[in-house]
Amino acid sequence: KVDRKCDAYMGMQDVVKKWTVFCPLVGELRDPAMRSRHWTQLIDLCKKSIVVSPDILLRDMWNLELHKFSEAVEDTADQAKQESKMEITIKKISAEWSGVEFQFDPHKGNPEVQLMKLPDDKVEMLEEHQVQVQNMFA
């Protein structure tokens, strides 16, 4: 029979509880969206000092005591994922606009003034991209 009030049992139970919180956090932090700015945010939160590299050890992550800040860690990982999505969208929009050539026509009343024109399909693309960028800020 196991004595559940024994110090060894209580200690192991505490460690197992911490690991059940810690393991999913490690999975979140392995996401490629995590940048150095996100790690800096977590290190500042934990008030610990570690060097983050692709070779980071599980022991070093455990020593950050992330289980104490699980909600903040999840928020930071979610923020990293959202920022990554935004970066991808912005790169896509930039790539599409890099090849667009604007047309310039002289103004009827003053031929020295040039009016910029876009083909209709590019105006539609502009409107779609405006909506995408607005959604990023929502």
Image (cartoon, rainbow, N blue to C red):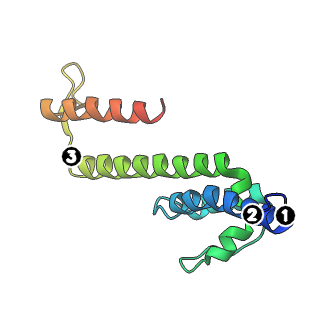
Alpha-carbon distance for marks 3 and 2? 74 Å
Question: Relative to 77, is 41 on the left or the right?
Answer: right
Check disc 1 and report the residue beneath it: 6
Residue type, numbered disc 2: Val
Question: Relative to 102, is 10 on the left or the right?
Answer: right
Q: Nearer the viewer, residue 4 or 106?
A: 4
Is the residue marked by circle 1 packed among few (<14), some (14-19), or many (20+) residues within 10 Å?
A: few
Provide the secondary structure element on which disc 2 rests.
loop
Could you tell which of marks 3 and 2 lies nearer the N-terminus?
Answer: 2
Residue type, numbered disc 1: Cys
Could you tell which of marks 3 and 1 lies nearer the N-terminus?
Answer: 1
Alpha-carbon distance for marks 1 and 2? 8 Å
Question: Relative to 82, is 49 on the left or the right?
Answer: right
Provide the secondary structure element on which disc 3 rests.
loop
Mark linked to residue 100: 3
Q: Nearer the viewer, residue 47 or 21?
A: 21
Residue 19 sits in which quadrant? bottom right
Residue type, numbered disc 3: Val
